Image (cartoon, rainbow, N blue to C red):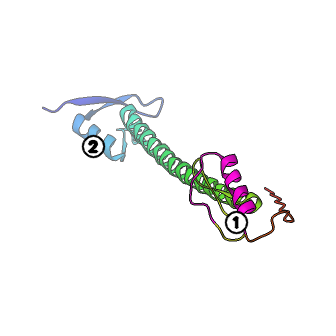
Amino acid sequence: MSNTTRITCVADSCGTFPMDDALVQKLKRTGQTFTCPAGHEQHFTESTEQKLRERIEELEAEVERYKSKYRNSRESRGTLYDELLAEKDRRKFAESRLLDYATGVIEVADGQYKWSCACDARGQKAFEDVEACQEALDRHQRRSCSLDHDDQEVTVHVEE
């Protein structure tokens, strides 16, 4: 003997009727329409469980979209950081070139300076202090430089 379920017809005046449990489950699963004994056409709507499953799937897809967006933003932030570091290095190089042209002193590494003169002479010793490096350049220019530095005037104009 199979179990039955009482189904309420969608028509207000119709009432209820019995239906085999296996058929009820099949109709719920497939969404097919059926009729009551009086001929009123009807169908089962999504169950609460099915609605919750679909909502969970939607939320999981949304989480994946946000994760992907987060990964992409992290990658783009990393790229931006690399670009900023490269720009910092370019500016530091340009500043050292300007310092070299203006004073003859160039930064060769962080906190290390060497001098170079317009006569193509270059200091071999690295100085930790810009002023000490400038003094070494001044000594070179006073003692052994082939150029007359008294008449030289260098103006550096930097625009950003």
Q: Quadrant of residue 141?
A: bottom right
Q: Position of residue 127 (x, y in %)?
A: 60, 50
Provide the residue designation for mark 2: 26
Q: Amino acid at mark 1?
A: Ser
The residue closer to the viewer here, 56 or 155, is: 155
The residue closer to the viewer here, 112 or 54, is: 112
Numbered label tally: 2
The residue closer to the viewer here, 154 or 42, is: 154
Q: Residue at x 50, y 45 (%)?
A: 70
The part of the chain drawn in magenta is 122-145
The CA distance from mark 2 to mark 1 is: 104 Å
Q: Secondary structure at mark 1?
A: loop
Q: Quadrant of residue 31?
A: top left
Please check the rendered image and state whether residue 130 is part of the magenta-colored stretch, yes or no.
Answer: yes
Q: Position of residue 20 (x, y in %)?
A: 23, 35
Is 149 positioned to the left or the right of 96 in the image?
Answer: right
